[in-house]
Image: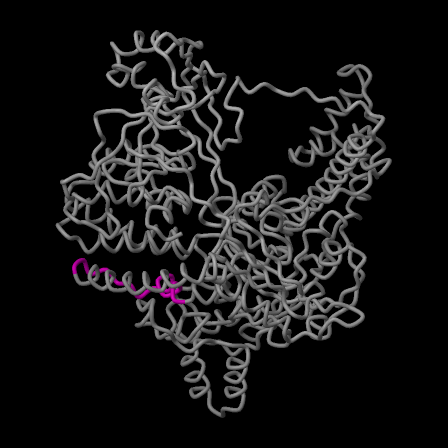
Amino acid sequence: MAVRPCPSRSVLSQQIIPHPHSSGSTTIIIPLASSIVLGQTPVSITMPSECPWAPFHNLADFEYTETAVNGLLSKELVDKQLAGFNSAWAIGSHLSIQNSTHMEAALAMAREYITQFKRDSVSVDYQGKAHKFDFEYRDPWEWILALIHDMSLAPLCMWNSVKKFHCIGATEERVFDEPNTGDTWWNVDSCLPETDEFQHCYVPLHFWLDKGMVTRRVKKFPMVLRPAWLPRQIRNASGNGGGLLLGYMPIIEDPSDPSNRSAAETLEFAQFKREVYQNVLARVFRTIKRRSRYGEAHRCADRIGRVLYPGILIESQDGEEASYFCACRAAMAKYPCPKCLVPKDELHHVSKAFPIRTSESMRAVIKEVSNTATKAKKEKILQDHGLHDIEHFLWDYRFSDPYKALSYDTLHSDDLGKWGKHLWGLLLEILEDKGMKGTLTRRMAVFPRWNGLKHFNHVTTIKFTDGQSFYDILKSILPCIVDLLPKDSALVHCIRTYLCYRMLVGLHCMTEGRLKRIKSLLKDYEKYCTLVEQEYGKNFDFLKQHASQHVIADIMEKGTTDNFSTRPGEGFQQEASQAYEQTNGKDAEHQMVKIDERQEAVAFIRMTIDNAQKASQLKHDLDPDADNEHTEIDDDDGPTSARTWKFGSPEGRKTTSRILETQCAPLDRDYASFDQRLREFIAHNLPKDALRYEDELYTRRYKCVYLTYQSVVDWTEERDIMRCNANFHGRSRHDCVIINDDAPGTTFGRIRDLIRCWLPSGEVIDVALIHGFSPSKWRPRTVWKGCRVVEEDRSSSLVLMDYVVRGGERTNYIIDSTDSDMFLRINGWE
């Protein structure tokens, strides 16, 4: 096997073109082979404050309060601990707070640092009676101002839209990642005035709402807001610039038994619930209504004056909440989609377009209804558009189309929807009828392990509820089921096509070429779904199936799907459950928002303390008179040249290659004639370092390698951890790698050993002892598109670590679904 260096990437670059209305309209070109790592966010450190723990008396007071708040300690426990610390428990304690009352007083002052909750109420008529709903919420505009005036976030703000292009020589294709790379933001910037005395900037928001069970019987509806003008690493986290608990949607109790209602009464109650949603949300977002149209001038943290125009760019909700938010009829309606007018019996079409809902078109429908004389005719118009007779609160907001903002969600539409509920459920039913569920369980239990991929020992006997588990099952399922189903199985082809679609739509960097592949895959997926329906009677007329029809438009308008995934919001459900446990169950939302305020306040002070410590350290490091001596760490005498790997878990001591052969050859045939083979390998690959017979060649074995590589997904740095261990947690594990050689396609090898060699010339080299793979003549019952069957070679060979690209996984099949980078590499879709 001839290996070759990685090809030059000097012709690769990324071009970033700012919107013409932005202050910096110079095109930026970033060479992808440079030391710059795309996706890194700059760090801003403000000057340290003398007392960053204020309003607490000292650091000890704050750190105890932080522990108590984040640990959700009860008032009684806090009093008991403080009494102990301030008496016999601790000697020389620096605590000045005496009890929970003192702690709460300090927290009350600390809450002034953050956006606090307000109380409000709405009243909605139902069956001739006014129903009042009290709720608490945070003012989104107050929160926006707090962020734009935050010095630590100033370098991170994306104030204008851009167009990104991936360039290979003279060819280029557009790239979508952050929301500001999408068409919607670009079009908004085009509608705003050009820069005059002030820059005119869109301030896009990401709104999430979902129901969750805080106990087995109690459910809550948290609302979360995220700043879409900050990078996703920031806004999808829980720290400063991350998601904000906006409040809890009031619980709408059903006053009667739903099973005893007539169709008209059911419709009336559905409209009542949507009216409550619309009224509550109108109150919550009312402070941005006027500003969305006319803007408001502010001097931001970077000392630049801007006129800010807030708007809701992204909404992330599951089906039921989406129908409430958009004031549309639910999944059983004649036209159930909140984004378009697809008939209910055509939801199986994922490659066919239907008329899109817009604020203007839906407002025209409601106006037509208001001008219609009879109730029957009104209902007919509403049914034909899947609407309730409600004016949406966002219709009067600028840059906030509720139907366009509603976005594709891979968690509910895919992992818990098309796959978790439908295709996986169908597969289990088929295998149960065949008596083969146990076979699937055993095969999944012995499926090779890979870092970041869940392993399933009881895949058919455990009821999974989290989307990640379903996604990991999908990635591993095909080799385990292909010979349990009929020859040339439509279901196998369907699952494979869907897997390819799911891998592509989940990419956090999308190109025009990848979007074209998604479009092609949707046509194939629809074709195989039709065959599955004919063979097994599966009905694909469900809303989550149809949602795929909107994914390409959503990506082009608002960036990649991770920008509008509901996954980050799901973390709030756990926080809500923990907060509820600390309440007495009466007026629980009020107690829960107070807990959130306390947690936000201590998080803000913790950030201030950390920034102060970093600033002090930076000041010390830059001081020429300071003692900045650092001790360099010797990396086990490894190769001195720049390298992308690092060996770990050394086995045994340094020994000569002849002794290593003597010790290992009787137990492992891979070490037969090892010394001679290693010397010939060095002479062939490093002729200047060729050894004489009498030269000693020292070696050491390792069980692990950490390998960094440039991802073909977004051209940033990623890392793999590969093992070669005969007893890794009780089982043998020898991972596979991709090798850069001159063979067509992708070359795999299984690591049998990792060896560091110290040459007499002084050079140190790292090599891998591997087994290669050859194409197999055997074929499975169903050869899906991209199916590659291989056999492991019995003989071993040596490869310099310089030519190992990254890790991989395989059984008798090449597994291309371990992660996005692997999927693109194996299929040649870089």
Q: Position of residue 183 (x, y in %)?
A: 54, 68
Q: Residue at 74% across / 56% down in the picture?
A: 148
Q: Residue at 65% across / 44% down in the picture?
A: 239
The picture quadrant where one finds residue 623 is top right
Identify which residue, 590 or 130, lies in the foreground.
Answer: 590
Identify which residue, 405 or 827, lies in the foreground.
Answer: 827
Q: Magenta part mainly helix, strand or loop?
A: helix
Identify which residue, 562 or 39, lies in the foreground.
Answer: 39
Q: Residue at 76% across / 40% down in the picture?
A: 608
Q: Where is residue 731 in the image (x, y as percent from the top left)?
A: 32, 21
- Quadrant position of the N terminus in the picture: top left
Res 280 visible:
no
Q: What stretch is highlighted in magenta?
A: 535-549
For residue 740, above or below residue 124: above
For residue 679, above or below residue 254: above
For residue 444, above or below residue 655: below
For residue 672, above or below residue 73: above
Q: Position of residue 457 (x, y in %)?
A: 31, 32
Asked if residue 286 is among those painted magenta in the image, a careful observer would answer no
